[in-house]
Protein backbone atom coordinates (compact mmCIF):
# COMPACT_ATOMS: atom_id res chain seq x y z
CA UNK A 1 0.00 0.00 0.00
CA UNK A 2 2.64 2.54 1.07
CA UNK A 3 5.02 2.23 -1.89
CA UNK A 4 2.17 2.17 -4.43
CA UNK A 5 0.41 5.16 -2.87
CA UNK A 6 3.62 7.16 -2.65
CA UNK A 7 4.66 6.56 -6.24
CA UNK A 8 1.14 7.23 -7.51
CA UNK A 9 1.00 10.66 -5.86
CA UNK A 10 4.59 11.58 -6.75
CA UNK A 11 5.58 12.14 -3.12
CA UNK A 12 9.24 12.60 -2.23
CA UNK A 13 9.15 11.16 1.25
CA UNK A 14 6.77 9.61 3.76
CA UNK A 15 8.13 9.15 7.27
CA UNK A 16 6.52 7.20 10.12
CA UNK A 17 7.32 8.07 13.73
CA UNK A 18 6.34 6.10 16.82
CA UNK A 19 7.17 6.77 20.45
CA UNK A 20 5.72 4.03 22.68
CA UNK A 21 6.44 6.01 25.84
CA UNK A 22 4.10 8.87 24.91
CA UNK A 23 1.87 6.96 22.47
CA UNK A 24 2.94 9.11 19.53
CA UNK A 25 2.08 7.70 16.11
CA UNK A 26 2.71 10.24 13.38
CA UNK A 27 3.17 10.32 9.64
CA UNK A 28 4.93 13.22 7.92
CA UNK A 29 4.47 13.34 4.14
CA UNK A 30 6.67 15.58 2.02
CA UNK A 31 5.17 15.87 -1.43
CA UNK A 32 7.45 18.24 -3.33
CA UNK A 33 10.30 20.49 -2.20
CA UNK A 34 11.32 21.89 -5.59
CA UNK A 35 10.24 25.42 -4.64
CA UNK A 36 11.42 25.20 -1.01
CA UNK A 37 10.80 23.28 2.22
CA UNK A 38 7.34 21.78 2.61
CA UNK A 39 5.09 23.77 4.91
CA UNK A 40 1.85 22.26 6.14
CA UNK A 41 -0.08 21.86 9.37
CA UNK A 42 -0.21 18.94 11.77
CA UNK A 43 -3.65 17.33 11.88
CA UNK A 44 -4.56 15.29 14.97
CA UNK A 45 -7.35 12.82 14.22
CA UNK A 46 -8.60 9.48 15.44
CA UNK A 47 -8.34 7.71 12.09
CA UNK A 48 -10.09 4.36 11.91
CA UNK A 49 -7.18 2.65 10.18
CA UNK A 50 -3.53 3.37 9.43
CA UNK A 51 -4.41 3.38 5.73
CA UNK A 52 -6.97 6.16 6.34
CA UNK A 53 -4.26 8.23 8.04
CA UNK A 54 -1.85 7.59 5.18
CA UNK A 55 -4.41 8.47 2.48
CA UNK A 56 -5.27 11.70 4.26
CA UNK A 57 -1.69 12.85 4.73
CA UNK A 58 -0.80 12.00 1.12
CA UNK A 59 -3.82 13.90 -0.24
CA UNK A 60 -3.29 16.92 2.02
CA UNK A 61 0.44 17.22 1.38
CA UNK A 62 -0.05 17.13 -2.39
CA UNK A 63 -2.70 19.85 -2.12
CA UNK A 64 -0.20 22.00 -0.18
CA UNK A 65 2.28 21.78 -3.08
CA UNK A 66 -0.34 23.19 -5.46
CA UNK A 67 -1.47 25.84 -2.99
CA UNK A 68 2.03 27.16 -2.27
CA UNK A 69 3.02 27.12 -5.95
CA UNK A 70 -0.19 28.89 -7.02
CA UNK A 71 0.43 31.54 -4.35
CA UNK A 72 3.91 32.36 -5.73
CA UNK A 73 5.50 31.19 -2.46
CA UNK A 74 8.96 29.66 -2.37
CA UNK A 75 7.64 26.73 -0.44
CA UNK A 76 6.90 23.13 -1.18
CA UNK A 77 4.05 20.93 -0.02
CA UNK A 78 3.97 18.75 3.06
CA UNK A 79 1.59 17.77 5.84
CA UNK A 80 1.59 15.65 8.98
CA UNK A 81 -0.96 13.61 10.88
CA UNK A 82 -0.84 12.42 14.45
CA UNK A 83 -3.13 9.43 14.94
CA UNK A 84 -5.44 9.48 17.97
CA UNK A 85 -8.18 11.29 19.80
CA UNK A 86 -6.71 14.71 20.52
CA UNK A 87 -8.57 15.03 23.81
CA UNK A 88 -6.97 11.93 25.27
CA UNK A 89 -3.56 11.67 23.59
CA UNK A 90 -2.40 15.28 23.47
CA UNK A 91 0.17 15.72 26.24
CA UNK A 92 3.23 17.95 26.37
CA UNK A 93 5.40 14.81 26.30
CA UNK A 94 3.72 13.58 23.10
CA UNK A 95 4.01 16.99 21.44
CA UNK A 96 7.69 17.15 22.38
CA UNK A 97 8.28 13.68 20.94
CA UNK A 98 6.54 14.92 17.81
CA UNK A 99 8.75 18.03 17.84
CA UNK A 100 11.79 15.73 17.75
CA UNK A 101 10.27 13.97 14.74
CA UNK A 102 9.87 17.30 12.95
CA UNK A 103 13.47 18.16 13.87
CA UNK A 104 14.61 14.83 12.41
CA UNK A 105 13.22 15.93 9.03
CA UNK A 106 16.12 18.38 8.99
CA UNK A 107 14.15 21.37 7.65
CA UNK A 108 12.46 19.62 4.73
CA UNK A 109 9.21 19.95 6.71
CA UNK A 110 7.90 23.04 8.56
CA UNK A 111 4.85 22.44 10.73
CA UNK A 112 1.96 24.66 11.78
CA UNK A 113 -1.57 24.52 13.19
CA UNK A 114 -4.35 22.45 11.65
CA UNK A 115 -7.39 20.48 12.78
CA UNK A 116 -7.03 19.80 16.55
CA UNK A 117 -3.58 21.39 16.83
CA UNK A 118 -3.33 24.90 18.23
CA UNK A 119 -0.94 27.81 18.70
CA UNK A 120 -0.09 26.69 22.29
CA UNK A 121 0.70 23.21 20.88
CA UNK A 122 3.16 24.83 18.45
CA UNK A 123 4.92 26.43 21.42
CA UNK A 124 5.48 22.99 22.98
CA UNK A 125 6.66 21.52 19.66
CA UNK A 126 9.02 24.49 19.28
CA UNK A 127 10.91 23.48 22.41
CA UNK A 128 12.35 20.65 20.29
CA UNK A 129 12.59 22.15 16.80
CA UNK A 130 12.92 25.46 15.02
CA UNK A 131 10.83 24.27 12.07
CA UNK A 132 7.52 25.65 13.35
CA UNK A 133 5.27 28.49 12.17
CA UNK A 134 2.03 29.82 13.66
CA UNK A 135 3.73 30.75 16.95
CA UNK A 136 2.26 32.71 19.86
CA UNK A 137 4.57 35.64 19.12
CA UNK A 138 3.89 35.30 15.39
CA UNK A 139 1.71 37.30 13.04
CA UNK A 140 -1.59 36.45 14.77
CA UNK A 141 -4.92 35.26 13.37
CA UNK A 142 -4.63 34.98 9.58
CA UNK A 143 -8.42 35.03 9.00
CA UNK A 144 -8.76 38.76 8.09
CA UNK A 145 -5.86 38.30 5.64
CA UNK A 146 -7.55 35.22 4.20
CA UNK A 147 -10.78 37.24 3.86
CA UNK A 148 -8.92 39.98 1.98
CA UNK A 149 -7.54 37.45 -0.51
CA UNK A 150 -11.00 35.96 -1.02
CA UNK A 151 -12.50 39.42 -1.51
CA UNK A 152 -9.84 40.28 -4.09
CA UNK A 153 -10.64 36.97 -5.80
CA UNK A 154 -14.34 37.84 -5.91
CA UNK A 155 -13.62 41.34 -7.27
CA UNK A 156 -11.39 39.91 -9.99
CA UNK A 157 -13.92 37.25 -11.01
CA UNK A 158 -16.70 39.87 -11.01
CA UNK A 159 -14.63 42.15 -13.25
CA UNK A 160 -14.03 39.27 -15.62
CA UNK A 161 -17.69 38.31 -15.70
CA UNK A 162 -19.40 41.71 -15.74
CA UNK A 163 -16.65 44.11 -16.89
CA UNK A 164 -16.49 46.12 -13.66
CA UNK A 165 -14.48 45.50 -10.51
CA UNK A 166 -16.92 47.54 -8.44
CA UNK A 167 -18.94 45.44 -6.05
CA UNK A 168 -21.69 48.06 -5.95
CA UNK A 169 -24.99 46.12 -6.10
CA UNK A 170 -23.27 42.82 -6.84
CA UNK A 171 -25.20 40.17 -4.90
CA UNK A 172 -23.15 37.73 -2.82
CA UNK A 173 -24.34 34.84 -0.66
CA UNK A 174 -21.85 34.07 2.12
CA UNK A 175 -22.23 30.61 3.64
CA UNK A 176 -20.59 30.48 7.09
CA UNK A 177 -19.91 33.45 9.32
CA UNK A 178 -16.90 32.25 11.21
CA UNK A 179 -13.56 34.03 11.36
CA UNK A 180 -13.22 34.34 7.57
CA UNK A 181 -16.88 34.60 6.52
CA UNK A 182 -17.65 37.43 8.96
CA UNK A 183 -14.58 39.44 7.92
CA UNK A 184 -15.42 38.84 4.24
CA UNK A 185 -19.02 39.97 4.79
CA UNK A 186 -17.76 43.21 6.32
CA UNK A 187 -15.41 43.90 3.40
CA UNK A 188 -18.12 43.16 0.84
CA UNK A 189 -20.77 45.33 2.51
CA UNK A 190 -18.29 48.20 2.86
CA UNK A 191 -17.77 48.04 -0.92
CA UNK A 192 -21.47 48.27 -1.69
CA UNK A 193 -22.27 44.61 -2.32
CA UNK A 194 -25.68 43.31 -1.46
CA UNK A 195 -24.92 40.44 0.93
CA UNK A 196 -27.08 37.55 2.08
CA UNK A 197 -25.64 35.37 4.82
CA UNK A 198 -26.26 31.90 6.18
CA UNK A 199 -24.99 30.02 9.22
CA UNK A 200 -26.13 27.21 11.45
CA UNK A 201 -25.07 29.32 14.45
CA UNK A 202 -27.76 31.78 15.56
CA UNK A 203 -25.11 33.56 17.61
CA UNK A 204 -22.94 34.27 14.56
CA UNK A 205 -25.97 35.43 12.58
CA UNK A 206 -27.04 37.80 15.35
CA UNK A 207 -23.53 39.17 15.70
CA UNK A 208 -23.13 40.01 11.97
CA UNK A 209 -26.59 41.61 11.85
CA UNK A 210 -25.58 43.92 14.70
CA UNK A 211 -22.79 45.33 12.51
CA UNK A 212 -24.07 45.10 8.94
CA UNK A 213 -27.25 45.41 6.93
CA UNK A 214 -27.48 41.89 5.49
CA UNK A 215 -30.26 39.49 4.55
CA UNK A 216 -30.36 35.99 5.96
CA UNK A 217 -31.14 32.71 4.22
CA UNK A 218 -31.86 29.40 5.87
CA UNK A 219 -28.85 26.99 5.75
CA UNK A 220 -30.87 24.42 3.79
CA UNK A 221 -32.03 27.01 1.22
CA UNK A 222 -28.64 28.62 0.64
CA UNK A 223 -28.00 26.72 -2.62
CA UNK A 224 -31.29 27.91 -4.18
CA UNK A 225 -30.70 31.60 -3.43
CA UNK A 226 -30.36 33.61 -6.62
CA UNK A 227 -27.15 35.71 -6.60
CA UNK A 228 -24.13 36.77 -8.65
CA UNK A 229 -21.57 35.12 -6.37
CA UNK A 230 -21.93 32.16 -4.03
CA UNK A 231 -19.13 32.27 -1.42
CA UNK A 232 -18.83 29.06 0.64
CA UNK A 233 -16.92 29.90 3.83
CA UNK A 234 -18.00 27.08 6.13
CA UNK A 235 -17.19 23.49 5.23
CA UNK A 236 -15.88 21.48 2.27
CA UNK A 237 -17.81 19.41 -0.25
CA UNK A 238 -20.76 21.79 -0.58
CA UNK A 239 -20.60 21.83 -4.39
CA UNK A 240 -21.69 18.33 -5.32
CA UNK A 241 -24.12 16.32 -7.45
CA UNK A 242 -27.05 17.33 -5.27
CA UNK A 243 -26.32 21.09 -5.03
CA UNK A 244 -25.02 21.90 -8.54
CA UNK A 245 -28.44 21.69 -10.24
CA UNK A 246 -29.82 24.02 -7.55
CA UNK A 247 -27.19 26.77 -7.75
CA UNK A 248 -28.54 30.06 -9.13
CA UNK A 249 -25.29 32.06 -9.38
CA UNK A 250 -22.70 33.02 -12.02
CA UNK A 251 -19.61 32.55 -9.84
CA UNK A 252 -18.59 30.23 -7.00
CA UNK A 253 -15.72 31.78 -5.02
CA UNK A 254 -15.16 31.21 -1.32
CA UNK A 255 -12.75 30.50 1.51
CA UNK A 256 -13.71 26.95 2.45
CA UNK A 257 -11.14 24.27 1.71
CA UNK A 258 -12.21 21.64 -0.84
CA UNK A 259 -15.43 23.36 -1.91
CA UNK A 260 -15.86 20.76 -4.68
CA UNK A 261 -16.84 17.32 -3.44
CA UNK A 262 -14.85 15.90 -6.36
CA UNK A 263 -12.66 17.39 -9.06
CA UNK A 264 -15.18 16.53 -11.79
CA UNK A 265 -17.58 19.04 -10.23
CA UNK A 266 -15.51 21.87 -11.76
CA UNK A 267 -16.60 20.58 -15.18
CA UNK A 268 -20.19 20.12 -14.00
CA UNK A 269 -20.24 23.79 -12.95
CA UNK A 270 -18.76 24.84 -16.30
CA UNK A 271 -21.53 22.88 -18.05
CA UNK A 272 -24.00 25.09 -16.20
CA UNK A 273 -22.03 28.23 -17.16
CA UNK A 274 -21.01 28.80 -13.56
CA UNK A 275 -17.42 29.95 -13.11
CA UNK A 276 -15.62 28.13 -10.29
CA UNK A 277 -12.75 30.08 -8.75
CA UNK A 278 -10.42 27.50 -7.15
CA UNK A 279 -10.56 27.72 -3.38
CA UNK A 280 -6.84 27.17 -2.87
CA UNK A 281 -5.96 30.10 -5.11
CA UNK A 282 -8.04 32.68 -3.26
CA UNK A 283 -7.94 31.30 0.31
CA UNK A 284 -4.12 31.21 0.38
CA UNK A 285 -3.97 34.17 2.80
CA UNK A 286 -3.61 31.80 5.74
CA UNK A 287 -0.64 30.00 4.19
CA UNK A 288 0.85 33.32 3.07
CA UNK A 289 0.65 34.59 6.66
CA UNK A 290 2.44 31.60 8.23
CA UNK A 291 5.04 31.64 5.45
CA UNK A 292 5.63 35.34 6.05
CA UNK A 293 5.96 34.74 9.78
CA UNK A 294 8.46 31.93 9.23
CA UNK A 295 10.58 34.17 7.01
CA UNK A 296 10.50 37.07 9.49
CA UNK A 297 8.03 39.27 7.57
CA UNK A 298 5.26 41.46 8.96
CA UNK A 299 1.47 41.30 8.92
CA UNK A 300 1.51 44.16 6.39
CA UNK A 301 3.77 42.09 4.10
CA UNK A 302 1.32 39.20 4.34
CA UNK A 303 -1.64 41.49 3.62
CA UNK A 304 0.10 42.91 0.53
CA UNK A 305 0.77 39.38 -0.76
CA UNK A 306 -2.85 38.39 -0.12
CA UNK A 307 -4.03 41.38 -2.15
CA UNK A 308 -1.88 40.15 -5.06
CA UNK A 309 -4.11 37.05 -5.23
CA UNK A 310 -6.37 39.09 -7.53
CA UNK A 311 -3.57 39.58 -10.10
CA UNK A 312 -2.67 35.90 -10.13
CA UNK A 313 -6.29 34.92 -10.52
CA UNK A 314 -6.64 37.31 -13.44
CA UNK A 315 -3.80 35.49 -15.23
CA UNK A 316 -5.56 32.17 -14.62
CA UNK A 317 -8.97 33.48 -15.75
CA UNK A 318 -7.45 34.80 -18.98
CA UNK A 319 -5.68 31.53 -19.64
CA UNK A 320 -8.84 29.54 -18.96
CA UNK A 321 -10.91 31.62 -21.35
CA UNK A 322 -8.21 31.63 -24.02
CA UNK A 323 -7.90 27.85 -24.13
CA UNK A 324 -11.34 26.66 -23.10
CA UNK A 325 -10.12 25.08 -19.91
CA UNK A 326 -11.64 25.56 -16.48
CA UNK A 327 -10.02 28.00 -14.05
CA UNK A 328 -9.10 24.95 -11.98
CA UNK A 329 -7.16 23.51 -14.94
CA UNK A 330 -5.48 26.90 -15.44
CA UNK A 331 -4.53 27.15 -11.75
CA UNK A 332 -3.01 23.66 -11.81
CA UNK A 333 -1.06 24.51 -14.97
CA UNK A 334 0.21 27.73 -13.33
CA UNK A 335 1.41 25.82 -10.24
CA UNK A 336 2.97 22.98 -12.25
CA UNK A 337 4.83 25.37 -14.54
CA UNK A 338 6.35 27.23 -11.56
CA UNK A 339 7.63 23.93 -10.17
CA UNK A 340 8.95 22.75 -13.54
CA UNK A 341 10.74 26.07 -14.14
CA UNK A 342 12.39 25.92 -10.69
CA UNK A 343 13.31 22.31 -11.26
CA UNK A 344 15.14 23.24 -14.45
CA UNK A 345 16.86 26.25 -12.83
CA UNK A 346 18.45 25.10 -9.55
CA UNK A 347 18.07 22.15 -7.25
CA UNK A 348 16.36 23.15 -3.96
CA UNK A 349 18.64 23.91 -1.03
CA UNK A 350 17.66 24.00 2.63
CA UNK A 351 20.78 25.47 4.18
P1 LIG B 1 -14.73 28.92 11.52
O1 LIG B 1 -14.77 27.60 12.21
O2 LIG B 1 -14.35 30.14 12.28
O3 LIG B 1 -16.17 29.23 10.86
C1 LIG B 1 -16.97 28.30 10.20
C2 LIG B 1 -18.40 28.83 10.24
O4 LIG B 1 -19.22 28.01 9.41
C3 LIG B 1 -19.03 28.79 11.64
O5 LIG B 1 -19.67 30.02 11.89
C4 LIG B 1 -20.02 27.63 11.55
O6 LIG B 1 -21.16 27.82 12.41
C5 LIG B 1 -20.44 27.74 10.09
N1 LIG B 1 -21.01 26.52 9.52
C6 LIG B 1 -20.62 25.23 9.71
N2 LIG B 1 -21.40 24.41 8.99
C7 LIG B 1 -22.27 25.20 8.31
C8 LIG B 1 -23.32 24.94 7.39
N3 LIG B 1 -23.61 23.69 7.01
N4 LIG B 1 -24.02 25.99 6.88
C9 LIG B 1 -23.71 27.25 7.25
N5 LIG B 1 -22.74 27.55 8.13
C10 LIG B 1 -22.04 26.53 8.65
O7 LIG B 1 -13.78 28.71 10.26
P2 LIG B 1 -12.98 29.83 9.43
O8 LIG B 1 -11.63 29.98 10.01
O9 LIG B 1 -13.84 31.02 9.23
O10 LIG B 1 -12.77 29.05 8.07
C11 LIG B 1 -13.85 28.85 7.18
C12 LIG B 1 -13.41 27.94 6.04
O11 LIG B 1 -12.30 28.50 5.37
C13 LIG B 1 -12.94 26.55 6.49
O12 LIG B 1 -13.27 25.60 5.50
C14 LIG B 1 -11.43 26.70 6.57
O13 LIG B 1 -10.76 25.45 6.39
C15 LIG B 1 -11.17 27.62 5.40
N6 LIG B 1 -9.94 28.41 5.50
C16 LIG B 1 -9.74 29.23 6.56
C17 LIG B 1 -8.56 29.99 6.64
C18 LIG B 1 -8.30 30.93 7.80
O14 LIG B 1 -7.39 31.78 7.69
N7 LIG B 1 -9.07 30.87 8.88
C19 LIG B 1 -7.59 29.90 5.61
C20 LIG B 1 -7.84 29.06 4.52
C21 LIG B 1 -9.02 28.31 4.49
Image (cartoon, grey):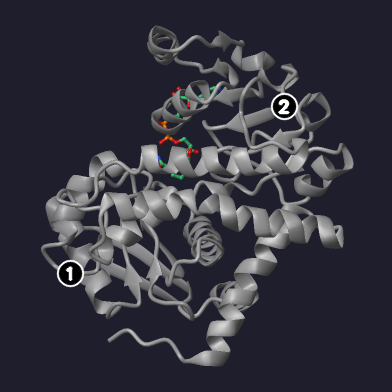
Quadrant for the N terminus in the image: bottom right
Q: Which quarter of the figure is the C terminus placed in?
A: bottom left
Q: Nearer the viewer, residue 247 or 116?
A: 247
Give coordinates of residue 17: x percent, y percent. Answer: 31, 70
Placement of 16 over or under 270, stated as above or below:
below
Q: Dot 1: few (<14), some (14–19), or many (≥20) neighbours within 10 Å?
A: many
To which quarter of the image does residue 25 belong?
bottom left
Residue at the (61%, 38%) spot, across then down: 154
Residue 279: image location, x then y, percent: 59, 46
Label 2: state its secondary structure.
Answer: loop
Of the pair 299 and 141, the residue shown nearer to us: 299
Q: Nearer the viewer, mark 1 or mark 2?
A: 2
Q: State the CA–CA distance, disc 1 to disc 2.
A: 47 Å
Residue 228, numbered label: 2
Disc number placed over residue 129 in the picture, else none: 1
- In this rendering, is residue 304 above or below 30? above
- Viewer-closest of 33 and 13: 33
Q: Going from the N terminus, do you reach mark 1 or mark 2 first?
A: 1
Amino acid sequence: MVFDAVSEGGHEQVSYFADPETGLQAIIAVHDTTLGPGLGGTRILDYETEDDALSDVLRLSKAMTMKAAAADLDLGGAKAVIVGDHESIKTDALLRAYGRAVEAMGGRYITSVDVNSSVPDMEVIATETEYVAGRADGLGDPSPITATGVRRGIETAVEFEYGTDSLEDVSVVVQGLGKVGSALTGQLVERGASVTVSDISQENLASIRESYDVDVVDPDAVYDESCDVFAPCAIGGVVNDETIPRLACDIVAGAANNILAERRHADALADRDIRYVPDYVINAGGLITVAEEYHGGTREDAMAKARAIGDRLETMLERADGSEMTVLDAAEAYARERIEAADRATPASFD
